[in-house]
Amino acid sequence: MRARSTLFTLFAEFLWPEGKAPVALLVRWMKVLGFSEPAVRAAVSRSAARGWLVREPGRPAVYRLSPRVRWQVAQVQSRLYDPEAPWDGRLRVLLHHVPEDRRGDRDRFRKELVLLGFGAPYPGVWINPSPRLDAARDLVRFYGLEHYVELFLAERRSLVPLAALLEKSYDLAAARAAHEAFLRQDWPTPKAPEAAFKSLVRLVHERRKTLFLDPGLPPDLLPEDWPGTEAQKRFLALRETLRRYAEPFLTQTASGVPVAGSP
């Protein structure tokens, strides 16, 4: 795990929804995960320089998620923990033609579309059966691509079989393999608070990666033997157990840590 990505795992898992923390607390937690204090402070500073974190007024140093990153974390949290609703029979369709001189924005935009569960069956065409059109609109506004993107709801038609369209849009074989690997893995659930904290951070960090492989299709569009259903149940059960074991560590490390404005 890298320092900056670990920071955001901590913000999402232990500091949500407040989305802020004293640097001293981040240092305490990340030392346990193997990061030195200079490495943590450097990661915080670089994140602030990129606009991912915002320092609150006063001392000691307290940082919060920027509005943009807070939005991203909210999308990840929803994808990771909220159950998918049944399919409403419609596809969310996004068409784009972003010019080459905005290739950097285009590539980042596409990556975030994948995180929202969109897939591309054809060049410039993205679909999503799940109701995330508003989130896609947010992305379009953030990147300033309003002139290059069309978003709309489409009633399902039978010109292309739905199963074939989904197979063309997503690498479901890779998603299946990731879920099956997770189910085979012997994940430790130590009862010692500090060890449970370390295991929990790694569990969430690793599980989050599957969001780039599995689009989170509505359950009625999944095959009956889809391993993601069982993998998600196992993940949530492991998370609950590890969180319970880790709670004394979290309480102890947070006690006595001052926040901005404290005397």
Image (tube, grey):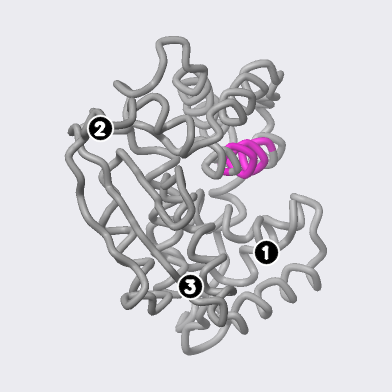
Magenta region, residue range: 199-208
Q: Mark 3 points at which residue?
A: 64
In magenta stretch: residue 16:
no
Residue, far top: 225
Q: Where is residue 164 shown, x and y percent of the image? A: 42, 27
Nearer to me, 159 or 168: 159
Query: Which badge, 2 or 1, is on the more N-terminal residue?
Result: 1
Residue drawn 70% across the image and 20% down it: 185
Instruction: Indicate the position of residue 60 as horizontal and vertical percent values.
Output: 58, 82
Q: What secondary structure is the stretch in magenta mostly built from?
A: helix
Relative placement, left or right, of 217 versus 197 is left
Quick check: marks 1 and 3 in contact, CB under 8 Å?
Answer: no
As helix, strand or loop, the secondary structure at mark 1 comes to helix
Q: Which residue lies furthest to the bottom in this view?
A: 58
**Image-based side of 2 in relation to 139, left or right:** right
Which circle's residue, 2 or 3, is located before the other in the chain?
3
Callout 3, which amino acid?
Answer: Arg
**In the picture shown, does residue 12 fall above or below 106?**
above
Residue at point 41%, 50% (across, down): 116
Q: Which of 197 and 3 is in front in this view?
A: 3
Q: How crowded is mark 2: few (under 14 residues within 10 Å), some or many (20 or more)?
A: few
147 lies left or right of 236: left
Tell which tag, 2 or 3, sits nearer the viewer: 2
